[in-house]
Image: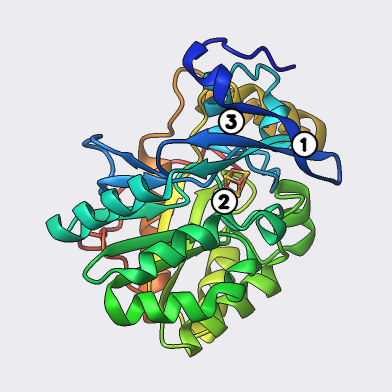
Amino acid sequence: MIRPGVPAPNLAPLLGREVVRERDGVRYFELEARSLMNRCTSEYVPFDWTVNPYRGCAMGCRYCYATYSHGYLGVEEADDFHRVIYAKKDSEGETLRRLARAAHRGELVALGTVTDPYQPGETELGSTRSFLQKVACLRGLRVGITTKGALILRDLDLLKTIHGRSSLHIQVSLISLDRSLVRRLEPLAPPPEVRLEVLSRLVGAGLDAGISITPILPGLTDAPRDLEALLAAAAGAGVQRFFRGFLFLRSPTREKYLAWVEREEPRLLPAYLRAYGSGSRLKGAYTTRILATVDRLAARYGLTNEHMGPVRVPPRQLRLFP
Ligand code: SF4
């Protein structure tokens, strides 16, 4: 249900009423924006600017941490994050001005921090490509892109230009090689083999592309043999970098994801309720053990993690999940 103006009344006049794309039960509207670039001052993330050409994301991931963000548009139903999507239409001049400022100061611009820039609607709406065309006009930028979408290959020409003029790092998200599990968890995202092929082609084109194993899902994607198969496949695609992180369950993602677990993986529900009973993040020996396992396996296949310290195996291992 959409209630324009709740709780962000200043956005109500900017919300388009006309559907600009409709397919598979997903409706896209237009959203006027001063610029596609938003200043980011959080001390918890490494970037200075975030760019999300869409609000909402049709990929439909059951664990999507960004579901809360639709609340700022007055969209109250959690699943509408995946069904009611806004494509931003910016003032080109202001976006170019902010890009120039970022280039001048050497600031990091992150594309796809909250929603996927290559989600299905991008095929026709082209908001991401339009932004990258501006990026490609400048030199000296630092740009990161995160996506699950194979459509990124459409923009290979622009990405190569940007790579030649600026610093560009791409992360393709893939949490498992299990096709059926991925289908259930990420209904409209491309299957694992397609994402591996995307990685292979990005690397083959000379671009800096890594795999993002985020979020690791306790009891579902955390088995060492599965993580090893995933890292081996990424290495086979020519990938040299990885990133990893655990499931983050803030409301309304928490309710949405736990309802999915109850429906599809009921054996895991008690462990999830225990582990996430008092917070949105997992902490303790279990996470340390799994992250250390990922780092050790990644090192075995020659993958490095920029954010990673020395690999240490925890002295005591606690088993929260079967
Ligand atoms: S692709 Fe990313 S932003 Fe889109 S639904 Fe999945 S987790 Fe959320």
Q: Residues within 10 Å of mark 2 (few under 14, many from 20)?
A: many
Q: Where is residue 36 in the image (x, y as percent from the top left)?
A: 43, 45
Which residue position is annotated with label 2?
116
Label annotation for residue 19: 1
Residue that appears at 52% across and 50% down: 216
Residue that appears at 80% across and 58% down: 180
Q: In this view, does 188 lie to the left or right of 216?
A: right
Q: Which of marks 1 and 2 is in front?
A: 1
Task: Please determine whether, in this image, residue 295 is positioned above or below residue 22.
Answer: below
Label annotation for residue 67: 3
Task: Please determine whether, in this image, residue 99 is positioned above or below residue 273.
Answer: below
Q: Cβ of disc 3 within 8 Å of ligand 1?
A: yes
Q: In this view, does 319 lie to the left or right of 148?
A: left
Name the residue type under label 1: Val
Q: Which of marks 1 and 3 is in front?
A: 1
Front residue (pair 45, 273): 45
- Return the disc, 1 or 3, that comes first in the chain's sequence: 1
Q: Cβ of disc 2 within 8 Å of ligand 1?
A: yes
